[in-house]
Image (cartoon, rainbow, N blue to C red):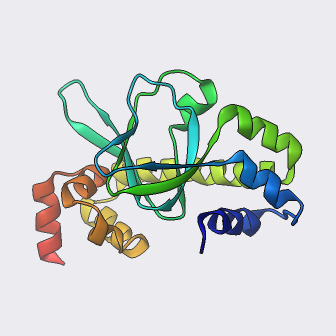
């Protein structure tokens, strides 16, 4: 499926866009790509885009005062990634976004998104649902780190994203789960 069609497919899942809306939507997005291990966003820069990943894998992370990386998001094909706080406030980001694989994306700027809401009002519903889901996922992740065991978090990830274990280095998965690589290794051996 061409990249444009993937994007339209996901918009049509939650909003009632018409054939007339499609060219307006597609003209609002631009293609972008990033090579494996290259940065899409660097902490301290302002996040200017929201990205729809058509093929590839990205991670967002921050580095604490001790120099330790903490992965906040891992996103693959047909998912969105951004630093929404920086994007909406247009203030510097605390996060880095880096490609785990060579990645193809479609991106939209803050200004263009605001204009698109006016041109295709039905898309406001899509993005409202998308941002609600992002907020709920962030809360679920926070709650999981407080109340679930590492084994439970691992099992949930394995159930919800089995392909992640083929495409993402285990050290990144451990960081995302909030555990050490050694703990992840022990958990995997016990399964």
Determine the residue positioned at 73% across, 37% down. Answer: 112
Q: Quadrant of the C terminus?
A: bottom left
x and y, in percent, of residue 36 in the image: 31, 52
* Residue 166 position within the rendered picture, expressed as x and y whole percent measured from the top left: 28, 72
- Side of 23 relative to 186 (left or right): right
> Residue placed at 80% from the left, 60% from the top?
22
In-front residue for pair 69/110: 110
Residue drawn at point x = 38 percent, y = 31 percent: 42
Place of residue 113 in the rendered image (x, y in percent of width and height, measured from the top left): 72, 40
Residue 3 location, x and y as percent? 59, 64
Question: Image height check: is 30 above or below 162?
Answer: above
Depth check, front residue: 145 or 103: 103
Q: Where is 86 relative to 101, above or below?
A: above
Q: Quadrant of residue 6?
A: bottom right
Residue 153 found in image quarter? bottom left
Quadrant that contains the N terminus: bottom right
In the image: residue 36, left or right of residue 183: right
Residue at x 17%, y 61% (from the top left corner): 184
């Amino acid at each position: 499926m061409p990249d444009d069609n993937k994007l339209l497919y996901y918009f049509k899942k939650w909003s009632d866009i018409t054939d007339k809306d499609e060219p307006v939507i597609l003209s609002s997005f631009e293609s972008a790509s990033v090579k494996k291990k290259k940065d899409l966003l660097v902490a301290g820069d302002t996040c200017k885009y929201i990205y729809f990943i058509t093929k590839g894998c990205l991670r967002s992370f921050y580095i604490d005062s001790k120099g330790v990386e903490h992965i906040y998001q891992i996103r693959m094909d047909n998912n969105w990634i951004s630093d929404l706080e920086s994007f909406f406030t247009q203030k510097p980001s605390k996060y880095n976004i880096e490609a785990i694989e060579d990645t193809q994306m479609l991106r939209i700027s803050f200004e263009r998104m605001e204009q698109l809401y006016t041109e295709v009002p039905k898309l406001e519903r899509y993005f409202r649902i998308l941002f609600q889901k992002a907020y709920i996922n962030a809360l679920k992740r926070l709650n999981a780190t407080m109340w679930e065991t590492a084994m439970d978090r691992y099992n949930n990830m394995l159930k919800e994203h089995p392909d992640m274990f083929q495409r993402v280095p285990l050290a990144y998965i451990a960081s995302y789960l909030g555990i050490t690589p050694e703990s992840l290794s022990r958990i995997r051996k016990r399964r």
